[in-house]
Amino acid sequence: LTPYLLCFLLALTSCDKKELKIGETAIIPLPAELIEGDGHFIINDKTTVSVNNQEQQTIATNFFKKFETASGWIPEISINNEQADIIFYTEKSLNPEAYELVVNTGGIHIKSASGAGFFYAMETIGQLLPTTFYSKEKQTNTIWGIPAVTIKDEPAFKWRGYMLDVSRHFFTKEEVKDAIDFMAEVKLNRFHWHLSDDNGWRIEIKKYPKLTEIGAWRVNQNDKDENTSNWWGRPTQQPGEKATYGGFYTQDDIKEIVAYAKARYIEIIPEIDMPGHSLAAIASYPEISCSTGPFYVGTGGVVRNNTYCPGKEVTFEFVENVLGEVMDLFPFDYMHIGGDECNKEAWEVDLDCQLRMKEENLADTHELQSYFVKRVEKIVNTHGKNMIGWDEILEGGLAPNATVMSWRGEKGGIAAARQGHDVIMTPSRYCYFDLKQGDDDLEPNLGYAYSFLKDTYNYKIISDSLTTEQGKHVLGLQGNLWTESLRNWSQITYMTFPRLYAVAENGWTSQADKNWDGFTNRLLNQFKRLDQKGERYATSAYNARI
Ligand code: TNX
C-alpha cells in the first residue's frame, strides 16, 4: 500500500504547481517615457540585487521587506556585484528625482543620480508586479513576473503634496504612517500636516504643556451622537464638562514620523495655524487672546473669538517659542503658519490692537493681520526656514519672502506669482478631498460643494494667465483633506482615493502627456491594489467620471 500512497501524495503536490503571474505596465503616475518590450523577468528568492552604497541598500531592503509580506522571501542584496540580476547604477547626469528603468528577460537595470530616483524606480517596479504585490497575505502559489519595459521618468513639478487635518479629528501615528505610505506609492513628496486648529492642538510643546494637557481634548461629541458623521453645529463644552476626545503626538512620535517619511523621500511641512483658527491654543493660554476667556476647545460650529492678539508682545513671545520647538523637529526648509479665515471682530474692539494699529500706522485690521504675519515671517526666516501661508496672507500686503498656498480658487496664487512669490496651488474646486466626489448618498462629508475626479485630473496647475517667468514660481500642487466630518481612517481613505491619484499624476506627468481615458483605465489596476491592501475607496468618483 505504501508505494501507492506515496504516488498519491506526489500527485497531490504536483497539483500545487506554481502559477506564473505577470503584472501590467499600467503605472500611476504615467511615466514620461514608457516602451513595452517582449517577455518578462521573474523575481524569486534566488534573485540577486546590486547597489552602490548604503542609501541604495536601504531602499532595496525596504522594498523587499514590504514585498516579503506577499512573497515570503528577501533576496540577496550586495554592494557593486556586476553579476546581479537587478543592478542599481549611480548616474550623476540625471535630474534629482529622475530615474531610468530597463526590464528585460535577463534582469533589471536602474539608473539614477539620487536616492529619490532609485526609490521611485522601485515604486514603479511595485506597480509592474502583479497587484498581489500589495497583498497582506503570503501568496504561496505565485511566480512573480515583471513585463519587459524601458522607462525614462521624471516629475513635471517638484511639489507634489497631500495635506491631512489632524485637528478636527485626531488620527494615530500608525494612520499617519499609512498616509505616508500611500503617498509614496504614487511618488508624492510633500506631506503637509495641519497640526493645530480650533478643535485640537496636536503637537507636544515642552515650554507650553497646557497646549496638549488642555488644547488636545474636547467634549466627545462622538459618544453623544455616534451616527452623525457631520458634527458641525454641536454645542460647545459647558463649564465643568469633561473633555475626553482627542490626542496628540509627542516630540518622539514626531521624530519617528519624520524619519519614516524621510525614508520614503517625503518632506513634512508642519502647519501651526494662526492668528485665526486658534481656539485650542487660546483655550490653553488665554493670555495670548484679546480677552480673558474662558475658552473651550471647539466642537464645531461657527467660531468667532478664536484669534491670537497681535496687540500684545506676549503673543509674539509665545509664537517664537512654539515655532522654535516645531521648526527644530522638522528638518525641511518650510514652516506653514496658516493665516486663513481670521475673524477680526475681537481685534476691532480690543484696546491693545487699537494701540498697535496707531503705533504702526495701520489703516485697518487687514493691515494688522499683515503686520502679524510679517513679524512671524521674521521669526521663521531667522530659523533659516521659508514661511508658507494660505492666500489670505496677501490681504494687507504680503510678507517679503512668503510662499503662498492658493485655496480660494486660483486668483491668490496668480497674484502672488505675479509679485514674484513662490506658490503652491490647492484651489478647493480641484484639490479639496473633503468635497463630495460622486453620489450624494455615499459621501460622508461636509457636503457644501463638489470636486470631481475629472476636474482634479484636468486642472491646469500653471494658469494660462501667467507668463513663462511667472509660471516658474508655481512649485506644484497639493490635495487637501479637511476632517471636520471624517472621524475614522476608512472615511479618510474613501475621500482620498481615487482623487489622490489624479493629484499625483497631475503633479508628475507633463501637461501634454496627461490623458483622462488612459488614467481611468490605469485606475482599475490601482483599485485592485487598494483591494489587496483592504483600503476603502470611492467607486462613486469613478462612476461620476464622465
Ligand atoms: C476652509 S482651506 C478652511 C478649513 C476648512 C475647509 C473646509 C482653509 C485654509 N481653511 O479650515 O476645513 O475650508 O473645506
Image (cartoon, rainbow, N blue to C red):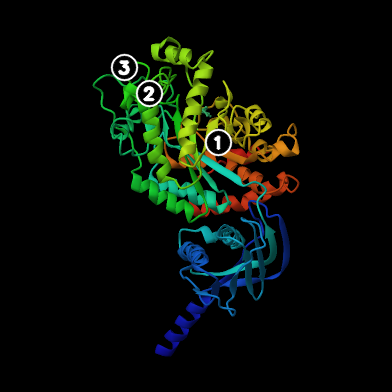
Pointer 3 local density, CA inside 10 Å: few below 14, some 14–19, many at least 20? few
Query: Is residue 418 left or right of 249 when viewed as pictured?
Result: right
User: Quadrant of residue 546 in the image?
Assistant: top right
Residue at left 41%, top 34%? 169
Q: Position of residue 141 (x, y in %)?
A: 51, 69
Q: Position of residue 542 (x, y in %)?
A: 63, 41
Is disc 2 placed on a helix, strand or loop? Answer: helix
Residue flagged by tag 3: what amino acid is it? Thr
27 to 414, vertically: above or below: below
Query: Can see residue 270?
Result: yes
Q: Nearer the viewer, residue 363 or 429?
A: 363
Residue that badge 3 annotates: 292
- Number of the front mark, 2 or 1: 2
In this figure, which residue is indicated by the disc labeled 2? Answer: 313
Residue closer to the observer: 504 or 422 = 422
Type of amino acid under label 1: Phe
Q: Which residue is mark 1?
A: 433
Ligand 1 contact, mark 3 (Cβ < 8 Å): no
Amino acid type indicated by mark 2: Glu
